[in-house]
Amino acid sequence: MTPGIPRNIRKDHIISALSTIDQEGYPKEHESIRYSLVYEGRKYPPVWVIRTANIFANKEPLDTSLYSGGEQSNNFLRKFGFRIVKKTHSEVDHTSFDFETMSRERIWREIQSKYKGQDIPAHVLRDTYRIYGGAGRIWVDRERTSKISNDASGITVSVFQKDTPYRDDFSESSIVFPYPVTNRRGGQDGLEITATKNAKKFNIPVFVITTSKKDPTRRDVKKGFVRDWDDTNQTFLIESGKIPEYTKDGSFSEDNPFSLNQKRKRSLASRNEMNPRFSFDVFKRYGRCCAVCSMNVGGLLSAAHIKPVSENGSDDPRNGIPFCQNHRLAFDTFCFTIHPGSYQIVTREHGPSKKDLEIQVEDISKLKALPDKFALQWHYKRFFLQNKDR
Ligand SMILES: [Zn+2]
């Protein structure tokens, strides 16, 4: 007996489910991909039938992530004498976005219910689910997905984070993923970049694959959406969860009204949680270089909040500024500030001086964009409060 489907579902529950579906229909995204249950000449999606039968058996719809389509559902229904047929090729539009989105969602549900997304043998991802290419970092399954995107590039299926990323580039819910720069023949890098941009254009989920912490031959999998890309810094932002308020369809836009403050759950405000989205937005907006010196080595740079998270400062990149680690610390501890009108660097009256701090600029005008004045005003005021007794 399959663990995910309650034992007390009976044949009459299933027949009641079929008549409910006749009356109410079912959501389009729950159309089955490969099989139909056939009853009195009509066809039904097996997973949705079981989900609905549970209402009659146990008074609530069954969580469809607890069991899988295909054999598990089909065998359960066959046991009661129902006929399951494979969909004919013409019944399935394999090249539609809906079909592709649906099959990725289904694979994701199966990976979660069988493996909780963790410690999955690589060959299962490659051969059973076909969402992993092995050696490459971006898996497109181009022959198949280019029929969907209707171009030469296809749509990225998964990205593989091979090596340990920079500390700021990876969290539970988001990743800053670098463009491939392998210079393989045939413009492979360019095709993979376009295929990953296609995943955002068509709003299709992608899988983020990482090496399991327990066993390096196994893989952890998450599901995310490509929310934005940065051609200058050559990075993608891939996220799961809700789209932040200060973005438009997931990308930061200057047209959004600025807000200096942002309410967070207390646990998030106190923990020094990595925020790849914030780093991505800050580096995209200002450029990947320290605002006050010439340091531009990735991994030694960080995106600082001007009004910090501990004071409920927002993650809007206009409340951010890129610094090297030293200058970030100096800014966070009010060794210097930035004048909100002239954007000039201001240091403490009794030092350390700009020279001591190795600040190489008079103002921050070398940045591609300027921070919001209200954010700088907050820091400027706090700088004087903090330093008045020194
Ligand atoms: Zn610096």
Image: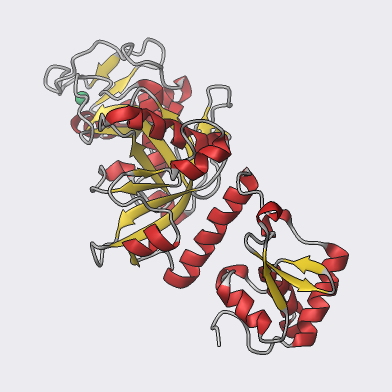
Residue drawn at (82%, 79%) of the image: 16
Viewer-proximal residue among 171 and 337: 171
Q: Which quarter of the figure has residue 183?
A: top left
Please identify the quadrant where the N terminus is shown: bottom right
* Up-down relation of residue 390 to residue 67 (above or below): above
Q: Is residue 245 visible?
A: no
Compared to residue 59, the image places residue 174 above or below, namely: above
The C terminus: image quadrant? top left
Q: Nearer the viewer, residue 225 or 48?
A: 48
Instruction: Identify the colour scheme used.
Output: secondary structure
Residue drawn 23% across the image and 62% down it: 216
8 or 96, nearer to the observer: 96
Please tell me in which quadrant of the rendered image residue 294 appears: top left
Q: Position of residue 147 (x, y in %)?
A: 55, 39
Visible residue check, residue 214 = yes
Q: Is residue 203 rendered to the left or right of residue 37?
A: left
x 73%, y 88%: residue: 10
Q: Position of residue 302 (x, y in %)?
A: 28, 34
Side (left or right) of 351 relative to 41? left
Q: Quadrant of ligand 1?
A: top left
Task: Give the x, y percent position of residue 45.
Answer: 71, 66
